[in-house]
Image (cartoon, coloured by chain):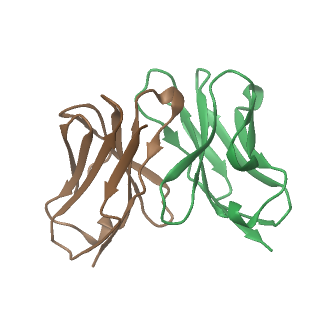
Chain colours: A green, B brown
Amino acid sequence: AQSVTQLGSHVSVSEGALVLLRCNYSSSVPPYLFWYVQYPNQGLQLLLKYTSAATLVKGINGFEAEFKKSETSFHLTKPSAHMSDAAEYFCAVWKAAGNKLTFGGGTRVLVKP
Amino acid sequence: SQTIHQWPATLVQPVGSPLSLECTVEGTSNPNLYWYRQAAGRGLQLLFYSIGIDQISSEVPQNLSASRPQDRQFILSSKKLLLSDSGFYLCAWSTDLLYGYTFGSGTRLTVV
């Protein structure tokens, strides 16, 4: 069975500092991986996805993520945090042929001025 | 373009009352449809998903049920709400999971 682990349910960063959100997956086959962002009282919005092309994936709002098969990781980064990045972030995995994504527990990001 | 509609946006219901949340998708055919719930501090919980009309899979035994009477309509229901049904309910659709899900804007349900 596949699963997704997000290390850290809460992350606090200063405005302008690096944002690093960790995601590790377990899968017996190469998965497809996604990062979503959720602002308060809103639905989830796709930030970026890895679908077996380039291992470094660039998304919206200046975020990027790198797929590392050897580490079974798909960590999300942004070089410089902005106040508008305060939100909850979810990592998700899909193993081809299934009908659903599996989500991690989410990481809430607080940006300090 | 494809859009997804969820309503109502907020709902306050007494314990024991019925529930009906509706989700509709426009601009696509034969989507997979999903209902998720977010309770405080509990992440995203998949409740139901559907790959076609009248084809519903239940992920978690509970006080809720789902129906798909039309291709692009997905309804979440309960006959008698419990306090534990409070949460943020999200509908999502996909036609190819290579592209992930598209989520609706959610319904905040408070059972009092």
Identity of the residue drawn at 20% across and 32% down: B53
Looking at the image, residue B39 sits to the left or right of residue A57; the answer is left
x%, y% of residue B69? Answer: 16, 39
- The percent position of residue A71, horizontal first and vertical second, equals 76, 32
**Which of the image's four quarters has the N terminus of chain B?**
top left
Residue B36 lies, with reference to residue B111, above or below; the image says above
Query: Where is residue A49 drawn, in percent x and y?
Result: 63, 34
Q: Quadrant of residue A47?
A: top right
- The residue that appears at 74% across and 24% down in the rendered structure is A54
Q: Which is more toward the observer, B93 or B28? A: B28
Picture coordinates of residue B86 (x, y %)?
33, 68
Res A2 visible: no
Q: Considering depth in this image, is B13 or B105 the residue closer to the camera?
A: B105
| Residue at x 43%, y 26% (from the top left corner) | A98
Q: Which one is nearer the viewer's eye here, A62 or A18?
A: A62
Horizontal side, residue A4 vs residue B91: left or right: right
Residue extending furthest toward the front: B1
